[in-house]
Amino acid sequence: MQLPPHCTLCPRACGADRAAGQTGLCGAGDTLRAARAALHHWEEPCLSGDPEAPTGSGTVFFSGCALGCCYCQNYGISQEGQGRPLTEARLAEIFLELQAKGARNINLVTATQWLPWVLPALDSARRRGLRLPVVYNTGGYETVGTVQALAGYVDIWLTDFKYDSPALAAELSRAGNYPAVADRALRAMLRQTGAPVYDPEGYLRRGVIVRHLVLPGQAADSQAVLRRLAAVRRQEKVPFLLSLMSQFTPFYHAADHGLGRRITSYEYRKVVDAALALGLTDGYMQEKSSAREEYTPPFDGEGL
């Protein structure tokens, strides 16, 4: 995959001439940038295992993002440009170093804008002994073409499904087409991986995890998301794991958009009850007290 002179890697299709150094709407230009590469202990248990264990998910946090979520907990790297330049060769070495440290998988966080570097780095690392499953950690705002281009590279899709309402998606993430785009992408992910497959220790080796973060005052939209997910499962006939998250914290510009508080136990319980009623019982829920600092690691260049 070549660095595009007219970038259409994400659904924004902004057309930036990144080969000439122009920066796209995602914040990415012609130099790969990332903010952290380390063992991460706070993903779903089937990815990172026991938080007290010395292993974890080998997570690389890339700079930039195609979405513009007003509440992003990683806003420093997603929207404010934090990160350090990397070469393709160094990225391949990072993958191998994470494996040597005991990573259970390679976890690529918001990598789409950097695929012209990421894919050859994975090829190189695999030639040199990388054998871990690859997790693609995405906000769900992906084109079907990008999902298809990742066949053979991605083993586990860790995708958000943020909204059912286009108006809410436009208000909070500047992407009114998010629900339709994420729906098409999720279906492509399910067709690509099939049902979840685990290793003998209970770690996921292949499959799809769909995350949904419950937002304050938006329980009705969360319930609509769950109805949509149940329909996707029924129509595609491919099971997936649902991760219902209660960890919302009013980061960044959240308060400016009516999200100036954490969710209540009642709000979260309503969403959980809806999931159970729809038969979406495979996956994970969070304790209401689970919003904690570890979910937002320091983007200090560790491991780069």
Image (cartoon, grey):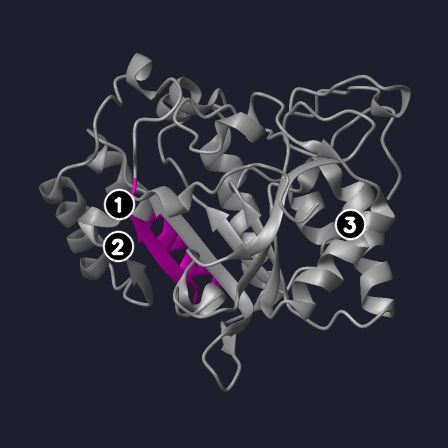
6 in the magenta segment: no
Q: Position of residue 230 (x, y in %)?
A: 34, 56
243 in the magenta segment: yes
Res 150 label: none
Label 1 CA crowd tier, 10 Å (few <14, some 14–19, many 20+): many
Of the residues shown, which amino acid type is indicated by label 1?
A: Ser
Residue indicated by mark 2? 286
Please tell me whether residue 260 is drawn above or below residue 52 in the rendered image.
above
Pick the quarter of the image with the N terminus.
Answer: top right
Can residue 162 be seen at all in this image of the molecule? yes
x 39%, y 67%: residue: 52
x 83%, y 27%: residue: 30
Query: Mark 3 touching mark 1, by CB under 8 A?
Result: no
Please tell me whether residue 276 is drawn above or below residue 141 in the rendered image.
below
Farthest left residue in view: 266
Task: Judge left or right: residue 176 versus residue 38.
Answer: left
SS for dot 1:
loop
Res 91 label: 3
Give the magenta part as a residue range.
227-247
SS for dot 2:
loop
- Of marks 2 and 1, which one's residue comes earlier in the chain? 1
Instruction: Between label 2 and label 3, give the one nearer the viewer.
Output: 3
Query: Mark 2 touching mark 3, by CB under 8 A?
Result: no
Label 3 CA crowd tier, 10 Å (few <14, some 14–19, many 20+): many
